[in-house]
Image: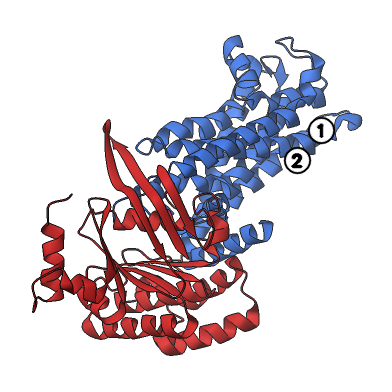
């Protein structure tokens, strides 16, 4: 479903070339739930932006759902759902319900499918009490649930999440985790999750990829990841070890 | 694409309806500021009967045709200006993940219906000029053609200005020279300007085709700069070439978008 082959992205900053991501190769199959970890500035967001076609890779090859994201961006948009924890993709001054209606038109979802899907999402994400409220007046937790619903209304094959639990309280976090697990299990949606919250990883991800200095530093199951450190280490200790290890 | 465009316009109109006072003020200010331009023309003609060989009503005709084209683009395309803010804030990301062209989303971005006041004002001036001038009826077909040509030229200039923002993120004002500057230039007969400037806006940025060249045809005038008669009809071709270039520049801009951290 997601395929990277030697993908890289560099930026020229004041005549210096900075490699945000270099020579990155991995494959994610349909239905997988993958955690994508890395310290700040490791290249996680850059990878995600290449997957959505926002950034054009400067080297290598990227394929999502069989498409080259940067060349077929608008076609791919119908098959991919994206959530940025740091910023909303909803329309600030519109009530949530109006944003959803607009998304229905933009993604050309037919009315009946839309209605049943929105009903389901409203129930599982508990949107009912604030669906008529303008987005700017929502709390962060409410807004994030709205953003998740918006990303899933068109039933994408791939869901890409960039820190979806950032800044949320424990109850909201648990709700969102439950929801993501259900989406993955019931709809078979492929999920790539970026997060700094290791609870998200422990709870949701069978497979973990770790990126550091723009390169893949680890790719395997959660158990494999735990095995890289002495026994009895917590996930936090394991990850700290990997983040602070000297880059190869 | 056209349906999506109007759907987005409607969405932003409803969002703007959350601020009704702002909407009313925009219409009033739009009409007032645009009317000041006309006031200047009227004051000039209170002191002279011709301006570079053109009568008051002829100047108002040239002002009106360029004004209508410009006001239409100012209302329906100029929102693309805001791309520099979106680039700086990183919010262009959220536009690029939608299955709709970024151009359509940005030209409708935070559309304010209040700008329609300016279109109205220009249409009134043009209507007055057409009624006051004794125009050759067989040449009137050129008037709608020149308005459409003007719309395409201004839309292309705005798109070019938008594409420039991907490179000149810190200087959005530079590109205003291209759009608002062009509109200012076209308010008067080009014969008041220096020959080299007129050459530049004929052959480099085809502003002369918004109202000057086709306007000369409608008014039955020879070009004081002596360009051949054929040039009066070259507008649509020039507009298409410019639109094509603007489209390519826009595509390049999007492909070179760098996003922001996080």
The blue chain is: B
Position in image of residue B186 (x %, y %)? 62, 27
Position in image of residue B154 (x %, y %)? 61, 36
Position in image of residue A214 (x %, y %)? 27, 51
Where A144 falls versus B12 (above or below)?
below
Residue occupying the point 58% across, 61% down = B8
Disc with the residue nearer the chain's start (2 vs 1): 2
Where A242 falls versus B131 (above or below)?
below
| Total marks in image | 2
Depth order, front residue of A90/B100 = B100
Whole-angstrom CA distance, mark 2 to mark 1, is 15 Å
Disc number lying in front (2 or 1) = 1
Q: Which colour scheme is used?
A: by chain
Q: Is residue A221 left or right of residue B165?
A: left
Q: For numbered disc 1, what is the local secondary structure?
A: helix
Tell me the residue that label 1 is attached to: B142
Residue occupying the point 78% across, 22% down = B232
Residue B145 occupies which quadrant of the picture?
A: top right
Depth order, front residue of A121/B243 = A121
Tell me the residue that label 2 is attached to: B127
């Amino acid at each position: 479903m997601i395929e990277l082959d030697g993908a890289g992205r560099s930026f020229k900053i004041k005549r210096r070339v900075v490699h945000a991501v270099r020579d990155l190769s991995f494959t994610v199959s349909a239905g997988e739930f993958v955690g994508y970890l890395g310290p700040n500035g490791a290249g996680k967001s850059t990878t995600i932006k290449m997957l959505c076609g926002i950034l054009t890779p400067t080297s290598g090859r990227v394929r999502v759902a069989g498409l080259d994201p940067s060349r077929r961006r608008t076609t791919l948009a119908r098959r991919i759902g994206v959530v940025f924890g740091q910023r909303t993709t909803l329309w600030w001054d519109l009530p949530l319900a109006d944003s959803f209606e607009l998304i229905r038109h933009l993604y050309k979802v037919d009315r009946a499918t839309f209605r049943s899907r929105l009903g389901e999402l409203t129930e599982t994400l508990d949107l009912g009490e604030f669906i008529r409220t303008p987005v700017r007046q929502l709390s962060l937790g409410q807004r994030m649930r709205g953003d998740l619903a918006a990303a899933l209304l068109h039933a994408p094959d791939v869901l890409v999440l960039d820190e979806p639990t950032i800044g949320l309280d424990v109850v909201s976090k648990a709700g969102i985790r439950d929801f993501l697990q259900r989406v993955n299990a019931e709809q078979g949606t492929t999920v790539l999750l970026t997060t700094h919250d290791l609870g998200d990883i422990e709870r949701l991800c069978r497979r973990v990829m770790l990126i550091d200095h723009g390169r893949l530093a680890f790719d395997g199951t959660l158990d494999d990841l735990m095995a890289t450190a002495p026994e009895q280490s917590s996930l936090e200790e394991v990850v700290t070890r990997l983040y602070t290890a000297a880059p190869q | 694409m056209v349906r999506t465009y109007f759907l987005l316009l409607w969405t932003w109109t409803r969002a703007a309806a959350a601020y009704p006072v702002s909407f009313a003020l925009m219409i009033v200010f739009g009409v007032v500021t645009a009317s000041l331009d006309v006031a200047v023309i009227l004051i000039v003609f209170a002191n002279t009967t011709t301006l570079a060989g053109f009568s008051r009503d002829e100047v108002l005709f040239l002002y009106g045709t360029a004004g209508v084209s410009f006001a239409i683009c100012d209302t329906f395309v100029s929102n693309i200006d805001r791309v520099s803010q979106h680039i700086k804030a990183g919010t262009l990301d959220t536009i690029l993940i939608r299955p709709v062209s970024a151009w359509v989303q940005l030209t409708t971005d935070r559309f304010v219906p209040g700008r329609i006041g300016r279109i109205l004002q220009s249409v009134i001036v043009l209507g007055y000029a057409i009624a006051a001038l004794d125009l050759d009826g067989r040449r009137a077909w050129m008037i709608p053609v020149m308005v459409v040509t003007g719309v395409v030229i201004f839309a292309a200039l705005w798109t070019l200005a938008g594409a420039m923002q991907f490179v000149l993120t810190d200087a959005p004002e530079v590109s205003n020279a291209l759009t608002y500057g062009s509109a200012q230039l076209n308010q008067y007969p080009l014969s008041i300007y220096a020959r080299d400037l007129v050459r530049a806006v004929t052959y480099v940025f085809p502003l002369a085709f918004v109202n000057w060249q086709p306007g000369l045809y409608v008014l039955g005038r020879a070009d004081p700069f002596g360009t051949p008669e054929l040039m009066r009809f070259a507008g649509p071709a020039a507009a298409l070439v410019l639109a094509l270039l603007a489209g390519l520049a826009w595509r390049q801009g999007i492909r070179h978008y760098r996003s922001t951290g996080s």
